[in-house]
Image (cartoon, helix red, strand yellow):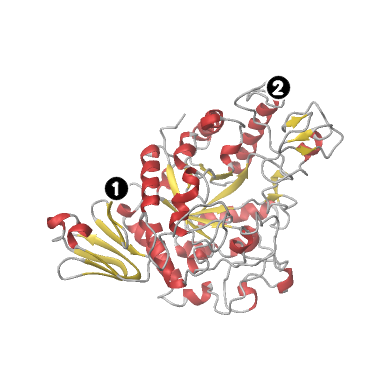
Amino acid sequence: MTSTRPGPDWLTDAVLYQIYPQSFADSDGDGIGDFAGITEHLDHLAWLGVDTVWLNPCFDSPFRDAGYDVTDYFAPAPRYGTADDLAALVGAARRRGIRILLDLVAGHTSDQHPWFRTSAQDPSDHRYIWSERPVEGFVASPGSRAGWYRPNFFDCQPALNFGYAREDPREPWRQPVDAEGPRANRAALRAIMAHWLGLGVAGFRVDMASSLVKDDPGFVETGKLWTELRDWLDRDHPQAALFAEWGDPAAAVAAGFHADFFLQFGGGDGLPLRSLWNNNAGTVKEYWQQGPCYFEAEGRGTPQVFLDAWRSAAELTEGAGHIALPTANHDFSRLATGPRTADQLAPAFALLLTWPTLPAVYYGDEIGMRFVPDLPDTEGSALGATYNRAGSRTPMQWAPGVNAGFSAAPADRLYLPVDPDPHRPDVATQRADPTSLLHTVRRLIALRRAHPGLGTRASVEVRHAGYPLVYTRAGRYLVAVNPRREPAVVPAEAAFGGADGARRTARPLDVQGVTIGAAGELRAEGFSYGVFELG
């Protein structure tokens, strides 16, 4: 099923930035971020070095799941602005060399969508999955149609019918993938994508991408569906990119996507990502089994879980697609969560921006915005007693003072409260401080762009998989990342690769607390990183 084409050339060198639109910038004082607010701050992204922006869902919605419950795929939600406002954003971004990706909610709609309202009245409509008898997990019909429908996530999000891979005459709701309802939904999906691509967006991140075809062992039929769409994109929109929310890059790329993210769930139960960042202080599933993460001050973790998962995925996706590594996302804790302090963040960005994955920065992480605990359940943000996503969705902190520069609205009208910490970071203050995290991130992005050997196409060789993590890129660059509090030393032979390697020169390109000793040993202070060019 896999396409042999890894995607448009621009994708190989992309630096992604995720924007949660309701929390980024409010231009009209209603307390909710909007398209015009994003447009006003595009210069920040251009200055930072970002070239690809993914917007969380911005279609019309009752917002019972923060926009992942769509009522009209062809119209923006009025709280964000008009279609003209979105077009202006896309155009203004393009003029700055920034591409816009939209979030496509492909597997379900809102229960307020006209399609579902019609289906709930018409027993002959098969756009959704209906049973005439109670089935575990199904929800009773809200309309005159007798029966129960299958939800895809929350009860208010009925699953669109893309068919079942396995039929069973005892379960007549299991329609084949080529039945009338599934065919109509595949056609609608293409029409939605074509509409927005025609207006200038650069592609899509697909929500719950593996969920479309039900009971699909090995995702065979799901892969056929996405590969069919990918073939259409390659033919009619060859510069468009398709990202998956799958959490298993090897599976997603095999299914036709250009790229997928390591996520807090998915392949390996999300451990490849969580073993790096998750310190069990933010969004935590009660069933997660995980030891200390690698990026913790005490230094009890290991990068090996991530390294093994990345290498396996890289081998399976080589030449066909990309793996994206995010700092966080709207469903998962920020880097600055719990006991992790601001001085621990630079090493994380050093890894993110020198490893051969597509780097994805979640809005505000570039200044070290923290996960804010103990917030109210907002638009379905709480998924359990220990998993409230609102903490990662608070307003962007642009400046000191009222509402951190996010909005002119009264504080009680904001989408979510601004971080109450009086020492909260902000863009303006860090922009004025060349030693800030913001400048560090900008510098590392620029370094990645200036040296293709630090990008996705160049080789990587791990020299030391402990504290610090030491690796070479393209045989020409040496990178050391020490996320623990205590300093660490790596002998020359290990850091440089044998006695001959220890005699190579190492020119610092971007260094915070890492030095090469007189005997060639690599010395890393606590919370440090170093990028060197080898001679």
> 216 above or below 338?
above
Residue 349, quarter of the rendered image? bottom left
Q: Residues within 10 Å of mark 2 (few under 14, many from 20)?
A: few
Query: What residue sits right under mark 1 in the picture?
Result: 459
Q: Is residue 319 visible?
A: no
Q: Is residue 497 above or below residue 123?
A: below
Residue 419, given in percent of the width and then of the height, sits at 61, 72
The kind of secondary structure element at disc 2 is loop
Whether residue 166 can be seen here: yes
**Which residue occupies the foreground of this view, 318 or 28?**
318
Instruction: Say whether disc 1 or disc 2 marks the residue closer to the N-terminus.
Output: 2
- Residue 197 horizontal side relative to residue 532, left or right: right
Amino acid marked by disc 2? Arg
* Residue 76 horizontal/vertical position (percent): 69, 50
**Residue at label 2?**
170
- The residue under the point 15% across, 71% down is 518
Relative horizontal placement of residue 54, taking residue 59 as reference (left or right): left
In the image, taking residue 454 as reference, residue 502 lies left or right, namely left
Q: Nearer the viewer, mark 1 or mark 2?
A: 2
Residue 525 bears which disc, if any?
none
Which of the two residues, 147 or 182, is positioned nearer the viewer here?
147
Horizontal side of residue 118 vs 322, given as left or right: right
Is label 1 in contact with label 2 (beta carbons under 8 Å)?
A: no
Q: Residue at x 59, y 68 (%)?
A: 372
Where is residue 185 drawn, in percent x and y? 67, 32
- Using the numbered discs, state the Cα–Cα distance from disc 1 to disc 2 in whole angstroms: 53 Å
Q: Position of residue 234 (x, y in %)?
A: 49, 34
Image quadrant in which the C terminus is located = bottom left
How crowded is the residue under tag 1: few (<14 C-alpha within 10 Å), some, or many (20+)? some
